[in-house]
């Protein structure tokens, strides 16, 4: 990184240098000033100046010298994950989930409340409020201690945090989620579509950490997609990317109906859709046929995305990913049928909690951006 200020903007240069130092210190091991200088390609004097500033702002902490060292030990620094707290919220059709984490994204407490999918706007927002308060109380954190909040929701979301369109939740179109959550926590609040944030979680801490081009398939009571292109979440011009399910020919609208049909004729049980996959796993022919038909419809839209983006990886997430053992091979066969090249297919380890983790990553993006904007003292 060049240390010559462009256009005399010394303040901007210091912000960029601080961001470079923080990136290097986000690993597990503390680093000395010499190591930081080599990794960031800053002079030692500039590195020391940045480290001193970040220490004063609470972003870094100095680590005790290694035992047994000879002579004057070199000072070592580590990113201070305990300097602040983040909040990640997933509000969907069947649940509200809130995570309180440190600045590394490690979960300190979580709260989950099941939701009736037929709830209206006011009742669903009340559940969200209870879930957030419960998560904060369980973590021993006051609302004012939350540095940033990420919120995931079904539907299309604009840049202000308002739901522009939602065809799966009653009375949800037009909800200003950003404004509502800001009444609960005073810090910055960012709102995004749940499929996009699930994809973000996979590239942050999931099975897609090594991949730059990823198609994430949300397989559950709803079907959706999130796209990672060149290592970045792809939103599109109006934040509508990945909404291929809106096209009836893509097959996603009718895909769950095959599972519904099997359930209508199956013996009653308490596990909902899981019963279809359990029966298929046990060799039930009708259940296998239902799962196969579901996967065939899922594969139509998935194939269109694969042919368009040529991703390195396809990740299956969402509630149905717990039963991916009976879905992956049929999906691979369908992609082989339609695609010029079938990418690797991986299964998310997060199941239906990946969306909330992606919301935490969204909140962390906001916090990290303050380094280059100077918003936090």
Image (spheres, grey):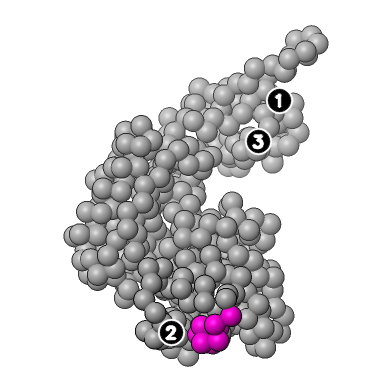
Q: Which residue is mark 2?
A: 262
Q: Quadrant of residue 213?
A: bottom right
Identify the residue at the far bottom of this view: 249
Quadrant of res 39: top right
Question: Foreground: 335 or 183?
Answer: 335
Mark 3–mark 2 contact, CB under 8 Å? no
Q: Secondary structure at mark 2?
A: helix
Q: Quadrant of residue 46?
A: top right
Residue beneath the point at 38% across and 35% down: 139
Q: Which residue is mark 3?
A: 28
Cα distance in 3D space between marks 3 and 1: 13 Å
Q: CA distance from mark 1 to mark 2?
A: 61 Å
Point 72% across, 80% down: residue: 341
Question: Vertical placement of 326 versus 212: above or below?
Answer: below
**First reached walking from the N terminus: tag 3 or tag 2:** 3
Residue at 61% from the left image edge and 38% from the top image edge: 26
Q: Which residues are magenta?
A: 283-290
Where's residue 5, x and y in %?
62, 38
What residue is pinned by disc 1? 32
| Mark 1 Cα-neighbour bin, 10 Å: few <14, some 14–19, many ≥20 | some
Q: Nearer the viewer, mark 3 or mark 1?
A: 3
């Amino acid at each position: 990184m060049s240390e010559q200020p462009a256009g005399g903007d010394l303040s901007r240069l210091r912000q960029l240098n601080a961001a470079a130092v923080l990136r290097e210190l986000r690993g597990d091991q503390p680093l000395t000033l010499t190591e930081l200088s080599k990794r960031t390609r800053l002079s030692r004097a500039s590195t020391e100046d940045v480290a001193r500033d970040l220490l004063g702002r609470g972003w870094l902490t100095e680590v005790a010298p290694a035992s047994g060292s000879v002579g004057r030990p070199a000072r070592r620094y580590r990113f201070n994950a305990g300097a602040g707290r983040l909040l990640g919220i997933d509000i969907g059709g069947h649940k509200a989930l809130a995570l309180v984490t440190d600045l590394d994204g490690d979960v300190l407490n979580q709260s989950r409340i099941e939701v009736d999918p037929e709830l209206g706007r006011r009742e669903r927002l009340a559940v969200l409020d209870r879930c957030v308060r419960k998560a904060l109380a369980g973590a021993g954190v006051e609302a004012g201690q939350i540095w940033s909040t990420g919120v995931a929701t079904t539907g299309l979301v604009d840049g202000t945090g308002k739901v522009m369109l939602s065809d799966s939740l009653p009375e949800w179109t037009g909800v200003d989620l950003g404004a509502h959550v800001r009444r609960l926590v005073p810090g910055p609040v960012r709102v995004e579509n749940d499929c996009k944030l699930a994809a973000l979680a996979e590239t942050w801490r999931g099975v897609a950490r090594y991949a730059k081009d990823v198609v994430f398939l949300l397989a559950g009571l709803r079907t959706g997609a999130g796209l990672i292109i060149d290592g970045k979440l792809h939103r599109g011009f109006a934040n509508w990317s990945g909404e291929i399910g809106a096209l009836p020919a893509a097959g996603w609208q009718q895909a769950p109906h095959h599972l519904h049909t099997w359930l209508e004729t199956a013996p009653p049980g308490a596990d909902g859709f899981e019963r279809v996959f359990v029966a298929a796993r046990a060799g039930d022919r009708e259940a296998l046929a239902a799962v196969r038909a579901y996967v065939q419809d899922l594969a139509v839209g998935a194939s269109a995305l694969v042919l368009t983006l040529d991703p390195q990886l396809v990740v299956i997430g969402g509630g149905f990913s717990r039963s991916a053992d009976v879905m992956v091979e049929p999906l691979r066969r369908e992609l082989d049928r339609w695609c010029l090249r079938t990418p690797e297919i991986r299964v998310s380890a997060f199941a239906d909690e990946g969306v909330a983790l992606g919301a935490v990553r969204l909140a962390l993006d906001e916090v990290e951006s303050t380094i280059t904007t100077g918003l936090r003292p």
